[in-house]
């Protein structure tokens, strides 16, 4: 029992009940107590929720336990060893003993990550590791797979072999280790509990969370490859938001594990990497030296993990030669195609390679300096503005993208010049309507001075109702002397972007180096045609599409005639 400064004592049951309280409830309790009592209760909670020190009898590692359990989980199937299994087990063991540890694991499909992490691991923690009170919360996109893993877990824990080793003694009056697991007290596949207080709960992504206080929060494949982009963003918001507050009192430090494949740049494993999770990335074939893009996009992990691990393989070496035939792996690679194979097998996000409308790989060798722009072969320059009217950090941007049409002459007499595009400059910001028009005017005056008669000013027109009418009238009144033209798109964003995307894929787009390159390329890379969100914008895409379509003579809009004196240039 814990003696407080008031002379009162807290029983073990009272301390244990704090585990089911929310962090806010515990905080409220702490604020009502003297500092020394807060520290004493916190120490008691930490002791209660920490794994016990291993005894001399507890020498069975997770890897060794899993090999013994294989006959129960996969009857008649021979266990096939693999170095990647040892790597996964070593990191899960480290997670067991390390509060606040955060781990991201990326493995190709059918390599055993689910059965080892969601079935064998919790059974090992309850049994050989001697922490029967440990609580697990497992989540995945698939309820069917969740039920399947839960069924395997139940079969293992209820097996005669497991119970004979780590279950209760035959004689309940005999002296035995109280930490050992006894019979499961729940038969529901989504929820198991043992009489030591240990729990294993399972739910789909987006489910559970509130009121849950596990020691281990695990997501195993937050998304499937076919999910739309909005599902990936929802999963990230769920993991970083709702699930970030789940766990036994924040100060005690629950562990968080994310497993899966890098299906997109915007996925849960990618979010975990950005948050600084310890990262184990094992592609089907070991990567060769990293590309510049790998380093910039953080898909290359040269630093050892917390236990000192780095990928042991030579470039091009197969991950699991004992369990996967090289020819079969290559056939799967062909079947999946370059986009899915890049994600599921190679662990390189789709948008960093071949997917998306504007992959960076297609522009890597198309960066040029301002002084190297072929001004003599440029016949037309457009700055196209996509307008917004907000100053908050959630508001869309106003973006003005300036693109030149380059008529590259052919060395062959009689052959027409090849049309190419050069993104010269991008101006982007969050301004109110008056500041925005001031920026547009100043930028346009500078453009006219720089480019002369080749320059045209275009603005995407707002809706012709309500505030849209007033905004357009304001812009026309203040910018009419600059020859402003208004463009009213009548097709979806993704359709309007096709012309620019085709030129991008065709190697016909060049970009002048500048400080704006980073945010410009970031935005284009993740563009999927959907409306912008708080963390994903499309304003530069709209500006680029608008300018490119005018320069390439792609009809996707209804154009209004120019206004003012500049219309005659």
Image: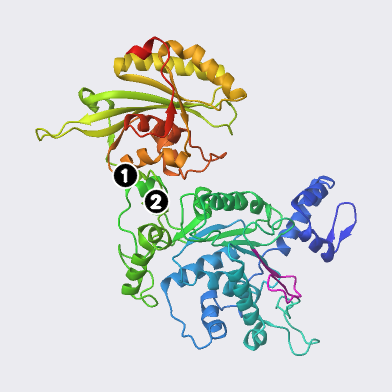
Q: Position of residue 185 (x, y in %)?
A: 76, 76
In the rendered image, the vertical position of residue 387 relative to residue 349, given as above or below = above
Classify residue 50 by image quadrant: bottom right
Do we see residue 442 in this rendering?
yes
Q: In the structure shown, which secondary structural element does the residue marked by tag 1 occupy?
A: helix
Q: Residue at x 73, y 87 (%)?
A: 169
Disc 1 target residue: 505
**Which residue is at the front of the view, 186 or 295?**
186
Do we see residue 55 in this rendering?
no
**Which residue is at the front of the view, 519 or 542?**
542
Q: Is residue 545 magenta?
A: no
**Which residue is at the front of the view, 511 or 417?**
417
Q: Position of residue 154 (x, y in %)?
A: 65, 78
In the rendered image, the vertical position of residue 534 relative to residue 30, given as above or below = above
Q: Position of residue 385 (x, y in %)?
A: 45, 26
Magenta part of the chain:
186-203
In the rendered image, the vertical position of residue 423 relative to residue 64, given as above or below = above
Q: Position of residue 367 (x, y in %)?
A: 29, 35
Q: Is residue 198 magenta?
A: yes
Q: Residue at x 65, y 88 (%)?
A: 160
Q: Earlier in the sequence, mark 2 or mark 1?
A: 2
Q: Residue at x 30, y 19 (%)?
A: 454
Q: In the structure shown, which secondary structural element does the residue marked by tag 2 occupy?
A: loop
In the rendered image, the vertical position of residue 75 relative to residue 273, given as above or below = below
**Which residue is at the front of the view, 186 or 480?**
480
Q: Is residue 1 left or right of residue 514?
A: right
Q: Is residue 506 left or right of residue 118?
A: left
Disc 2 target residue: 355
Where the N terminus falls, by quadrant? Answer: bottom right
Q: Residue at x 32, y 13 (%)?
A: 569
Alpha carbon separation for disc pair 2 and 1: 11 Å
């Amino acid at each position: 029992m814990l003696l407080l400064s008031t002379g009162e004592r807290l029983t073990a049951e009272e301390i244990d009940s704090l585990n089911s309280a929310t962090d806010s409830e515990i905080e409220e309790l702490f604020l009502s107590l003297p500092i020394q009592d807060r520290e004493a209760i916190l120490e008691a909670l930490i002791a209660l929720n920490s794994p016990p020190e291993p005894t001399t009898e507890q020498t069975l590692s997770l890897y060794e336990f899993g090999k013994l359990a294989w006959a129960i989980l996969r009857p008649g199937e021979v266990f096939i060893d693999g170095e990647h299994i040892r790597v996964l087990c070593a990191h899960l063991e480290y997670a067991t003993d390390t509060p606040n540890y955060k781990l991201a694991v990326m493995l190709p499909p059918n390599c055993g990550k689910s059965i080892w992490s969601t079935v064998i691991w919790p059974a090992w923690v309850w049994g050989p590791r001697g922490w029967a009170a440990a609580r697990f919360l497992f989540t995945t996109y698939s309820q069917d797979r969740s039920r399947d893993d839960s069924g395997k877990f139940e079969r293992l824990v209820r097996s005669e072999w497991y119970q004979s080793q780590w279950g209760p003694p035959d004689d309940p009056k005999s002296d035995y280790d109280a930490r050992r697991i006894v019979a499961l007290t729940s038969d529901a596949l989504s929820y198991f509990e043992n009489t030591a207080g240990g729990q294993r709960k399972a739910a789909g992504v987006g489910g559970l969370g509130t009121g849950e206080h596990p020691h281990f929060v695990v997501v195993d494949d937050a998304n499937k490859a076919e999910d739309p982009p909005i599902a990936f963003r929802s999963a990230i918001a769920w993991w970083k938001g709702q699930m970030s507050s789940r766990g036994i009192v924040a100060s005690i430090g629950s562990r968080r594990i994310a497993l899966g494949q890098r299906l997109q740049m915007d996925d849960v494993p990618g979010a975990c990497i950005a948050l600084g999770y310890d990262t184990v990335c094992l592609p089907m074939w070991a990567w060769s030296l990293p590309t510049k893009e790998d380093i910039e996009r953080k898909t290359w992990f040269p630093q050892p993990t917390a236990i000192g691990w780095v990928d042991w393989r030579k470039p091009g070496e197969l991950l699991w030669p004992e369990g996967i035939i090289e020819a079969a792996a290559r056939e799967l690679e062909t079947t999946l195609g370059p986009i899915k194979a890049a994600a599921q097998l190679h662990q390189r996000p789709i948008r960093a390679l071949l997917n998306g409308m504007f992959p960076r790989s297609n522009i890597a060798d198309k960066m040029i300096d301002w002084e190297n722009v072929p001004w003599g072969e440029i016949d037309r320059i457009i700055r196209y503005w996509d307008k917004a009217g907000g100053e908050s950090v959630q508001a869309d941007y106003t973006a003005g993208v300036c693109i030149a049409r380059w008529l590259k002459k052919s060395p062959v007499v009689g052959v027409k010049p090849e049309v190419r595009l050069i993104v010269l400059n991008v101006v982007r910001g969050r301004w109110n309507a008056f500041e925005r028009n001031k920026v547009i005017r100043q930028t346009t005056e500078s453009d006219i001075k720089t480019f002369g008669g080749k320059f045209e000013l275009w603005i995407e027109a707002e809706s012709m109702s309500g505030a849209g009418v007033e905004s357009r009238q304001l812009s026309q009144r203040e910018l009419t002397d600059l020859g402003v033209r208004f463009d009213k798109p009548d097709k979806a964003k993704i359709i309007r972007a096709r012309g620019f995307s085709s030129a991008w894929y065709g190697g016909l787009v060049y970009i002048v180096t500048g400080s704006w390159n980073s945010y410009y390329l970031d935005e284009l890379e993740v563009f999927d045609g959907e409306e912008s969100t708080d963390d994903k914008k499309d304003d530069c895409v709209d500006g680029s599409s608008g300018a490119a379509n005018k320069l390439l003579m792609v009809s996707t809009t209804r154009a209004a005639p120019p206004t003012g004196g500049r219309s005659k240039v």
